[in-house]
Amino acid sequence: MALSHISTSFLIVSRLSIFFTLTNVRADLINDVCSKTKKPATCLSALNGDPRSKSATLEGLATISIDISLKNTQSGRDLANSLLKQATDPKLKTRYNSCLEKIYNDTIDDLKELPPFLKSKDCIGLNVHASAALDGPITCDDNFSSPPAEALQLKAASDKLVELIDIILVISNLLRR
């Protein structure tokens, strides 16, 4: 009876130890990835904000990052569309239209192309296409290099998208090792 109690206690302690070790490993993985990004706080917030991250591998974190980037790109596109509809200045209309049609739509297409590269473990393809997705928000911001100025909300959306895509780039580099 005493041996059975000791065996049961040992199994419980062992399982708890494994659970906490795996939890710490996942937290360390997220911290490792995020420490290599340009904006670690954005990375930590994005990845820790997704419940799938708690049990994710590096590939899983890549999938989560792609999903979050895609969602944010779609929000940026919606914002650009809203700003376009509200704009009265012809220059602003042209710039918002450029952000909307050529840039945000291309970025969405680039991000949608990433999962097959990840699935096939083509880290170079993943990196190249994630880099291409970066062009969208950067080019959108560049459209506003002269007056009239870019709407602050659109600038913030572009900046955040760049930070999110950076997570994908960091992970693609880590996957190459």
Image: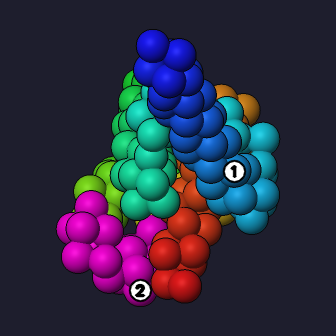
Is the residue marked by circle 1 packed among few (<14), some (14-19), or many (20+) residues within 10 Å?
A: few
In this view, 63 is above or below 11: below
Which quadrant holds residue 1? top left
The span picked out in magenta is: 115-131
Q: Nearer the viewer, residue 140 or 23?
A: 23
Is disc 2 placed on a helix, strand or loop?
helix
Residue 75: horizontal and vertical position, in percent? 44, 31
In this view, 7 is above or below 113: above
Q: Is residue 123 visible?
A: yes
Q: CA distance from mark 1 to mark 2?
A: 25 Å
Which quadrant holds residue 122? bottom left
Residue 14: horizontal and vertical position, in percent? 55, 35
Residue 82 falls within the magenta-colored stretch: no
Residue 53: horizontal and vertical position, in percent? 49, 38
Q: Which mark is residue 124?
A: 2
Q: Quadrant of the C terminus?
A: bottom right
Q: Residue at x 62, y 43 (%)?
A: 21
Q: Residue at x 55, y 30 (%)?
A: 10
N-terminal of the pair, mark 1 or mark 2, is 1
Q: Which residue is mark 1?
A: 28
Give the prevailing secondary structure in the magenta stretch. helix
Amino acid marked by disc 1: Asp
